[in-house]
Amino acid sequence: MINISETAQSHFAKLLEQQAEGTSIRVFVVNPGTASAECGVSYCPADAIEPEDIEMKFEHFSAYIDGDSKLYLEDAEIDFTTDQMGSQLTLKAPNAKLRKVNDDAPLFERVDYFLKAEVNPQLAGHGGECTLMEITDDGFAILQFGGGCNGCSQIDVTVKDGIEKQLLETMAGEIKGVRDMTEHERGDHSYY
């Protein structure tokens, strides 16, 4: 579930030596599954362990995973590095903002996950976003664009050369194309 590097384990062990007996660490996600999700680590006194917490045992300490955060911490990594600039604890949780979807999930869920995880972060740089509205019986993903994408002069290029091309590669044989159902209106909100 979570990979805690050897250097991070040593760092946590040293920190925990200075805490009350029985103190562990807790790994959690605040606002999981949202754009404002934040991954965190804190001390976890013995009396703060919840029944639904998941214990990960290490040589010198235990880490408790918040039960509600479990799915959002899949493939997470915690590392501790030291260089000329000092030392730094890093947490990478690629699924914190969006729960990973299984390969055998329904097609709609997999396409929706792909758009939210891969496409929308790219569109956000232009103040835009897209939403999957439906998948037609003949295999077309119908998208609704908003923000800076609405009325953008490059929307056709984004749809055909960007999103459609990526979806056809990723969902080969399942998706035949992408259609834009947005009624684009030029305006001050559009990115040019």
Image (cartoon, rainbow, N blue to C red):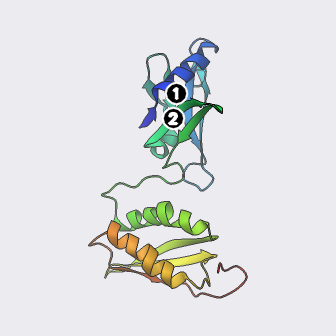
Disc 2 element: strand
Give the SS element for disc 1.
helix
Residue 95 in the image: above or below residue 81: below
Q: Residue 85 at x, y = what percent?
A: 66, 33
Extreme residue toward the front, this view:
84
Q: Position of residue 187 (x, y in %)?
A: 70, 85
Q: Which amino acid type corresponds to the residue marked 2 in the rendered image?
A: Ile
Horizontally, residue 107 falls left or right of residue 90, namely: left
Note whether 59 is above or below 89 in the view shown: above
Residue 8 picture location, percent across and down: 52, 27
Q: How many marks?
A: 2
Q: Quadrant of the C terminus?
A: bottom right
**Residue at left 59%, top 33%?**
89
Residue under label 2: 78
Image position, residue 91 (x, y; %): 55, 39
Q: CA distance from mark 2 to mark 1?
A: 7 Å
Work out which residue is located at the far top of the displayed protein and give it: 21
Q: Which residue is mark 1?
A: 8
Q: Residue at x 54, y 18 (%)?
A: 13
Nearer to the camera, 138 or 59: 59
Categorize mark 1 by other alpha carbons within 10 Å: few (<14), some (14-19), many (20+): some
Q: Are marks 2 and 1 in contact (CB under 8 Å)?
A: yes
Residue 149's disc number: none
Q: Is residue 4 left or right of residue 45?
A: left
Residue at left offset 39%, top offset 70%:
166
Residue at image point 62% right, 71% down = 126
- Left or right of 153 in this view: 133: left
